[in-house]
Structure formats: C-alpha cells, structure tokens
Amino acid sequence: MSSRTVYYLGPQGSFTHAAAKQFLSRVQRASGETDSAPFHNATSTVLQPAEHVSQIFEAVNVGGAFGVIAWENNVEGYVVPNLDGLIDAHNVVGCGRVSVNIEFDAFMLPDDVAEPTEVTAHPHGLAQCRTFTQHLGLREVPAASNAAACRDIVSGQIALGPRICGELYGLATKQRGVQDYQGSRTDFLLLAPRNEARSLMVGDQKPSAEYESVVAFIPLSTGAGVLAGLLDLLRDAGLNMTSFISRPIKGHDGTYSFIATIDAAPWQSHFRSVLKNIIERGDWVKTLAVYARQERPNPPVTSWMLPDGGAGGRDSLSADEAATRLQAQFI
C-alpha cells in the first residue's frame, strides 16, 4: 500500500488545481469499482503543486505519478507549450478530460495605496482580460500561473486569478469578473504513464463506448497531396475529425506535426486499421490522449461570429462577386 501523487500547476487556487480535484473525485469513484484501478490500493492520494509544467511531465514520465495540465481554452485555443510537451514526452499520455469555467477577479494587496501600474497573470489569463488591462493602462507582467501571480503580488500590481485566490492569499478584490468573454472555459487533461492509462480511464470501456483520441501525425515525405492522402484515410474509414492543427518541428523549416482529434479509440477496429495503414505507408504516428467522449454542443455559426474582411457564409453576394472581393484585396 502506498500513496499516489497527482501533480498540477500550482500554487493552490489555480484553475489547474480545481481541475485536479475534479479528476481525483472521478478517478477515486472509478477505483472503488475495480481492484485493478491504479488508486485502489493506494493508502492516500496527494495533490502536489508544481512550479512549472515541465516538472509535471517529468514526474509522470519516470512513472509512479500522475499529472494535470491545461489543454484547450475556448477563447485562446490550445495551450501550445503543453501540446508540444505531450508530443515530445516519452512515457506520458492523456487519459481523461474535464472542463473548468474560467472567471477572473482582479486583486490587490490589502491597504495598498500605490496607484497600480502593472497587471500580472499567466499569459493566457492576461490575454483573456485585455480590455480591463488596457482601460487602466497597465503593463503586463506574465507569471507561471494565475495563482502564482496572486501569491507573489507586490505593491502597485493587480493580479488576475480565480476568486478563491483572494481568500487563500489574503488579497483585496478590486473588481470581479474582469474577463473579456463570458462563458470562457478551459479543458484539462489527466496525464498518466502509458502502461497505466487504460485502467485510469473513467467511463464505459465496452467496444460500443464512445471515445475521443488526440493523435499526432508526421508525414516523412512532403509534397503535393501528402497531407490530403493522410486525411483521405480518415475520411474513407468514416472517422469524424473534430479538430486539426499543425505544429512546426522545431528548427526544421517546412516540416510539421499534424494533430487531429478523432471520435474513436485506437483499439476500435476501424481506427486501428487506419493507424496500421499510416504506419505501413512509412509515416510516423503517436497517440497523445484517449478519453471518454464528452457531450459536445453543435451550435450553428451565425453571421456575427464571422471575422470582418472575408466573404461567403450567408451574405447577399453571389459566389462570383465574393471571389472578386477576395481577389481585389490583393490588387
């Protein structure tokens, strides 16, 4: 009997801390259902803050620990350093996904009489509260996490963070809800060593269960049609792809890894055959995460959501007129 440690980006009070507590509750419920679950024989489970995400990856990579990282925000998109870390990690895979609502309060030191000149938060936090920052004319000071910004705040600074940080770090609230967008949400991944990930997954694991997988592909040859051929394999297998992005292979011009989120698990026959086909073609593939599929909204894209300067959608122009508009932008 031994304790198991779950690392999260600290300090206490961070959004990742909140996600880690969600995961712990879910995994402990699942552990009670089977003696083979990783937490079943643990005397205790410890939530351990880490100063940097790289420490989380290292702890999971060497085995015996688990981790929680921010993955995707519905305002700022993927947390790119964490995505790159998962691509490069040797023995780390995502095996669960939860969402945390993101709301920022603005804090100051109690009784601070200095006129604030700086605002501090995680870079994603700064990006999500820019209207507030610009209105006050504050200089942005990035921090390792939003909770760290609140913990380490100095006179003349405003720190942005979850509401709980005010109580945790004895701060005065200057303003509540300073985020630019209401309804902001961040998804987090539970990380595990690859040999323990399947037993940690929470949810139905019968063949008919629904899953999502995040998979990285690297075509080993480049040129016209290479990426299209890869996507054709997914389409022809009837696989639904819900996200597709690219990341540069660092220091090598013109080479990329492509990351797809797909509605299937790699042990399901139609997806497994695609993975086998990709490997037989000589391309490289890596499963980054697999988790029980969550309910996904499917709202229509209305005209007010579309950026300015484009053409198409439901505007009144004919296709020929729209194409002419796009051409005229470069004349």
Image (tube, helix red, strand yellow):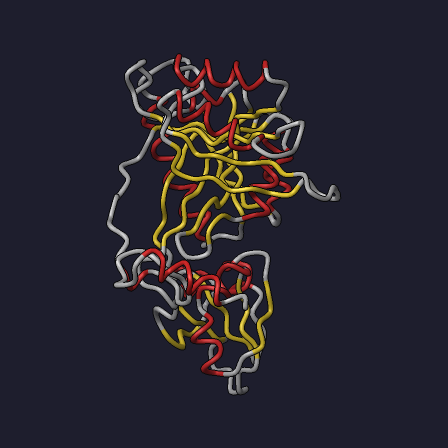
* Depth check, front residue: 54 or 109: 54
Q: Is residue 262 left or right of residue 294?
A: right
Residue at image coords 43%, 71%? 106
Where does residue 109 sit, x and y in percent of width and height? 50, 75
Where does residue 330 sit, x and y in percent of width and height? 54, 66
* Depth check, front residue: 77 or 120: 77
Above/below status of 4 relative to 250: above
* Depth check, front residue: 102 or 34: 102
Query: Can residue 180 be seen here?
Result: yes
Residue at image coords 55%, 76%? 157
Which corner quadrant of the image does residue 143 belong to? bottom right
Q: In this view, does 32 lie to the left or right of 189?
A: left
Where does residue 29 sit, x and y in percent of width and height? 32, 27
Query: Can residue 42 be seen here?
Result: no
Q: Is residue 211 left or right of residue 229?
A: left
Above/below status of 285 relative to 320: above
Above/below status of 67 relative to 229: below
Where does residue 264 sit, x and y in percent of width and height? 38, 24
Q: Quadrant of the C terminus?
A: bottom right
